[in-house]
Image (spheres, coloured by chain):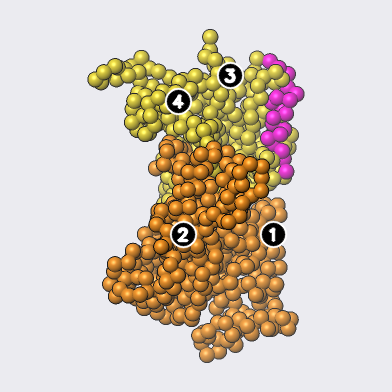
Chain colours: A orange, B yellow
Amino acid sequence: MIGSLTTPRPADFADVRATNLAVVLQHVREHAPCSRADIAAATGLNKATVSSLVTDLLERRLLRETGLTENRIGRPATMLVADGAGYAAVGMEVSADHLTAVALDLAGERLLSWRRSFAGGDASPGRAVAAVAGLARRALAKVTGQGRQVLGLSVAVPGLVDAAGTVRVAPSLGWRDVDLAGQLTAALHGTGAAGGDGTGPGRPAVPVRVGNDAHLAATAEHRWGAYAGTPDLAYVTVGTGVGAGIIADGRLLRGALGFTGGLGHLPLDPAGPECGCGRRGCLAAVAGVAGLLRRANPEAFTDGPPSDWEPELQEVLRRARARDRATVAALSEVGGALGHAAAILANLVNPAVVIFGGYVVPLAPWLLPAARQRLAQLALAPDAGGTELAVSTFGHDAAATGGAARILAAVDAGDLPAPVPAPG
Amino acid sequence: MIGSLTTPRPADFADVRATNLAVVLQHVREHAPCSRADIAAATGLNKATVSSLVTDLLERRLLRETGLTENRIGRPATMLVADGAGYAAVGMEVSADHLTAVALDLAGERLLSWRRSFAGGDASPGRAVAAVAGLARRALAKVTGQGRQVLGLSVAVPGLVDAAGTVRVAPSLGWRDVDLAGQLTAALHGTGAAGGDGTGPGRPAVPVRVGNDAHLAATAEHRWGAYAGTPDLAYVTVGTGVGAGIIADGRLLRGALGFTGGLGHLPLDPAGPECGCGRRGCLAAVAGVAGLLRRANPEAFTDGPPSDWEPELQEVLRRARARDRATVAALSEVGGALGHAAAILANLVNPAVVIFGGYVVPLAPWLLPAARQRLAQLALAPDAGGTELAVSTFGHDAAATGGAARILAAVDAGDLPAPVPAPG
């Protein structure tokens, strides 16, 4: 297969119409309220074409007419706004300590955001699937109960996920070769009892996709974050593990099999601490939450690893604010390791910004100065190739939100839901 | 700016025609000889459209009719083949020890391939520009003397090059902020005397582009190499310096400012040897040609660094073939460093193959086994995420060839040369 640049496809009628539907939808989303004439003027499409495209989008409930009209010479024009309230995308995340679920409508409005403790690191894949399916069922029931059609369910996992939705390796969950997409589809649609929950036999199957957590968080940043629309950015999630999602020229970098962004187990220092993966000096061993606490709050490990990181991290934050020297020095060391990782990203993929998410966000004032210094030292390009460091403005639901974003992006790209009869 | 995935452009008439011209051209290139009817059947375009597109491409001298006809029921069909012999692209490379020039016609036929010694590492940028311009002038004169129109001149440099063609840093040349594109354009078109050399005032200016050597070599591999068409591949050039070009989903990974693939100065080991760049343990210090010779042929440095690497490398090859244990061990160590670099690429960008080029090619039998072993140890994904290691089948002109490939790729993507009157 030749890549996209070297095999242009013929622009046939269906392609042109799908492209133009997406163009009109995007224009209205960005410039609403606007009239059919506005769309024609801005896109260069002729008015009859715009009129036909708008009719199609109204039937699909992706646009709606407002009561407003535009005052202009001649006949008043009916104004259009983007709709999409009739459709929803559900995004979830399973991590070593939490399950998260969000739902967004097609306009990007948040319909729900749930987070619950879940000992993912101790659960078998089977128990994890059951827990994810349970939460998914409730989220789907809530959204469909509001009369919305669910376009898809996307689940983020801290590991390498192949194109079929199988989790090949997830070190912090202890998983290998878990067919999460298949098992979840079976749990939701195959054998469950039909009921009022919007799932089960007889209900239209909701497509299930599985993705890497950092990939999906990067997708959320690219769509809605503080650096939204930046064509080249990287998101680095720092939690039990560490991973990166890279947006290159506006698209998620997927690589041959989808295994990109494995920043956490790059060996930064052959003489560094031993990592859970069996290697030495991995970034995850230094900057993952356990590595950070071992340096900044070693007492937390007196009786073995703490079962809940949150209070221990709060204690680190309290000491840093109190300018405790050992704590500040430990955070500076961890920040240096994050800067080393950022330098590898800067040298190899040259993002405009590396956005750190996860537990590092509240600790950023003590981590980022050391990270920036190390980045400047190690990057080859002047001014680190322009690569800035920032922290995410998302909370813990970046990856779940990104899962929903991926479903919505497919609609933007022209994969529109079929026209449906308007509700009675 | 929103990235390409989220901003579809309206498919207007000019776009459709440019796309379809490129589609027809590509179809003929891959399936020649073929008739207009064949093209219509394969592309789904209607016959009248194909006929009009073919006429346009014949006028641009990108297709030509053969005397052949196809035997079928009804009127015999005139067969078409790709032409492009009337156009050429010139690619050059300036490195620490050589200047290279190649020229290819639009069909990919090689018109010339020159290589000469040049002490780039010792030359000032001004002298280097003069030397490049001199060789470029001769290459352009030869190609235009054959009646060909030159579509562009592309120069590969072992360093970071910005979008304007300024070399920001080239460690092995000792350059910083050299406006190579501007200086070369001035040298070729601005002030030179007009003459029979196809350049100088009064001649149409040949557009000059400057790019990173590994980026361009990767482009050549993607277009014509043993792994041509593989959507995700990386090329690692190993010479005086070390750099990578990454093709992701069929496109060159450029990053925010074009500074991608800086593999040579990733610090692999904080305790490693000092590098010319001032850092420690860089890949370039271990696996660059000087680092390799220091390990595998230390006597070469008895009177300071050798002025010519080639005979010293031949000596290493001779000893390796004779199974000299110290040499084999040194090569294995260097191979390990190359495997470490490949693991970083595998973990971060997951290419299907990492292709090594440069001096490592003849030494591959002693380097690659250790590299594969280290890759398997350090990569996170099972089976190194499918990333294979290989050596380039190009000689020393991979980067120069890639420069020409980039110019030809613009034509494939629909940026066709204007129709010209046929030669008299």
In the image, which residues are magenta? B177-195
| Residue B206 seen in the current view | yes
Amino acid type for the residue under numbered disc 1: Ala
Q: Say which mark, if any, is on residue B144.
A: 3
4 or 3: tag closer to the N-terminus: 4
Residue located beneath label 4 in the image: B53
Q: Quadrant of residue B202?
A: top right
Q: Are marks 1 and 2 in contact (CB under 8 Å)?
A: no
Real-space Cα separation, disc 4 to disc 3, in angstroms: 27 Å
Instruction: Specify whether B303 is left or right of B383.
Output: right
1 or 2: tag closer to the N-terminus: 1
Q: Nearer the viewer, residue A395 or B409?
A: A395
Q: Position of residue B352 (x, y in %)?
A: 43, 51
Q: In the image, are marks 1 and 4 on the same chain?
A: no
Residue located beneath label 1 in the image: A376
Real-space Cα separation, disc 1 to disc 4, in angstroms: 53 Å
Residue located beneath label 2 in the image: A407
Residue drawn at (32%, 19%) of the image: B77
Real-space Cα separation, disc 1 to disc 3, in angstroms: 47 Å
